[in-house]
Image: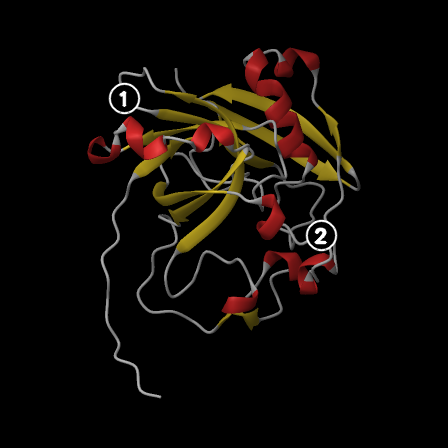
Amino acid sequence: MVFMSQSISMHIIAHICSDFTTKFGIPRQSGLVDTLKSTIVFEPEYRNPDALRGLEGYSYIWLLWQFSEAMREGWSPTVRPPRLGGNTRMGVFATRSPFRPNPIGLSSVRLEGIDLHSELGPVLYVSGADLMDGSPIYDIKPYLAYTDSHPHAKGGFALQSKEGVLRVNFPEHLLHQIPPDRRDGLLAVLAQDPRPAYQNTPERVYGFEFAGFEVRFTVAEDQLTVCEVNNTQR
């Protein structure tokens, strides 16, 4: 069979507003931290409430979005998944790596609510997103459990080495610097171990930005200890 190669244009319909201003610390998959709250703001051209008619009847939605911080010229047929320690190459189409021929991400998030009276037009409130703040969104589709969920599906190498849950030592005087409505989400992110899988140096201090704060921590065995919190908005 002969196919003609052609390009199509895609339109950014919205952007997400999340607590992550950098890639470090973002959960590895959507839904891992369901206490993370985000909002989706549509571009002016798509702020028509009619486009969301009926969406309130769904509890989860799919987001098709752009890995805007992973744009590259060209592509590689193999990548190094962090799950395998960053040393083993696997086929790009067997991974969820952001470095793809087309830098498109797919995430399932919980739809918490819709604000149809916002000055920004319709705004979606979601939880469990794994997107960096400002990530462009190409499309939104309803999640259908009867066809989208496959509980007995094989997990491939992604399930060969599950991430454990760390014990988090977050001193009270540091935790109180974080806004109360952001604490549960941050604690859950830390428990998931935000370090790259191939880094395991107890003396090393890691850090990432979350909700306007830089959170610095160390990890020894199965315990993560927060050692510093700095307000980045001052």
Of the 4 image quadrants, the one containing the N terminus is bottom left
Residue ID at (42%, 31%): 54
> Can you identify the residue that label 2 sits on?
151
Q: How many marks?
A: 2
Q: Where is residue 87 drawn, in percent x and y?
A: 62, 66
Snapshot quadrant of residue 72: bottom left
Can you say whether 160 is above or below 222 in the image? below
Q: Where is residue 104 drawn, in percent x and y?
A: 40, 54
Q: Which of the two labelled residues, at mark 2 and mark 1, occupies the earlier sequence position?
A: 1
**Disc 2/disc 1 C-alpha distance (Å):** 38 Å
| Tag 1: amino acid | Leu
| Tag 2: amino acid | Pro
Q: Nearer the viewer, residue 189 or 41?
A: 41
Residue ID at (30%, 27%): 49
| Residue 120: numbered disc | 1
Neighbour class for label 2 at 10 Å: few (<14), some, many (≥20)? few
